[in-house]
Amino acid sequence: MDVYRKIDDNDIISFDMFDTLIKRYVPTPSDVFSLVEQFYNNRHTCHIHGFKDNRINSEMCARKNNNYNEINIDDIYNYIKYDNVDAGELKVLEEKIETEVCYRNDECVKLLNYAKKKKKKIIITTDMYLSQKTIEAILNKNNIIYDRLFLSNEIGRKKSNRSLFEYIKEIYSNKKILHIGDNFKSDILNAKRSGIDTYWWKRKDMKCKNIQEYMLKNFVSNNIKKKQLNSSYEELGYKSYNAALEEAYKNEMKNLKDGEYSKEPVKTSYGYHIVYRIDQKEKPALE
């Protein structure tokens, strides 16, 4: 059945959050941990190494020692161990980066807005270790309006074992519920087994060589194509096109027409760049 028909036929519309309503600028959630290490080391002379593996293993330990019941980010950081490093600073940095790398999935938000126009109650249903404050900050930053948040680590129940769906069914016992999500087991099979109607939101992943390319392509798709650039971006060409620039950058700019951007990241000694050409000023006449 068409998803809009499903929305029409139900009273409560539940949305999964990550990879459904919200996307990240990174290929996988654990790539956030790589960014935490990078940002921390940029701030401090005493560097940390292997944080991604340390963070993944700490979460596994926290889950195992909690009998695989839901955990929160504080539980995870109890297992983060570095000499002369404040784990609390790393935790705050992770929450900040998570907020920064998350952006709204406009295709799915379109469904949410349709449901709102139809006067449906909107709930967010997510299995997540991040704090409620961080989750709400991500949703607010992306202008996602909802009626109620069901966060696994606050409630102590999870979609992955159906208990969160059963809890929602108890609360809305006399209502018809539709859940929209990307994970076929947690979002679709478990919701159906709990007597909840479902719609499978199929992810569209990009194929990229590395995390830098993935983040740049996502940035282009979510900002440049929508023309959401601020003045600092728009002034870059006029200010920076000069003989001191590397040839790769200058050649890309020459090859572009006004209103075009690089289809692939341009690599220089400074890193990777997306070149977006606004226009070209007229050359002054020689006197």
Image (tube, rainbow, N blue to C red):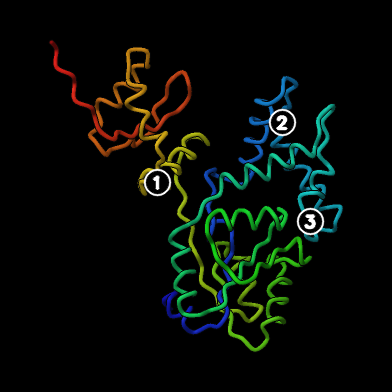
Quadrant where the image shows the C terminus: top left
Q: Residue 41 at what x, y percent from top left?
A: 68, 26
Helix, strand or loop status at disc 1 = loop
Question: Which residue is found at the position 18% from the left and 19% from the top?
Answer: 284
As drawn, is 80 to the left or to the right of 103?
right
Q: Residues within 10 Å of mark 1 (few under 14, many from 20)?
A: few
- Residue denoted by label 3: 71
For marks 2 and 3 on the same chain, the one whose residue lies earlier in the sequence: 2
Residue under label 2:
50
Q: Which residue is mark 1?
A: 228
The alpha-carbon separation of the residues under discs 3 and 1 comes to 37 Å
In the image, residue 32 above or below residue 65: above
Labels 2 and 3 touching (C-beta < 8 A)? no
Q: Position of residue 276 (x, y in %)?
A: 33, 34
Front disc: 2 or 3: 3
Residue nearest the observer in this picture, 178 or 246: 246
Around disc 3, counting alpha carbons within 10 Å, would you say few (fewer than 14), some (14 to 19), or many (20 or more)? many
Label 3 secondary element: loop
Front of the two marks 2 and 1: 1
Q: Residue at x 48, y 78 (%)?
A: 7
Residue 184's x, y, as percent? Answer: 57, 65
Mark 2, secondary structure of its residue: loop
Question: What is the number of the mark on residue 41?
Answer: none
Mark 2 and mark 1 in contact? Answer it, CB < 8 Å. Answer: no
Q: In this image, 263 relative to 190: left or right?
A: left
User: What amino acid does circle 1 point to?
Assistant: Gln
Q: Nearer the viewer, mark 3 or mark 1?
A: 1
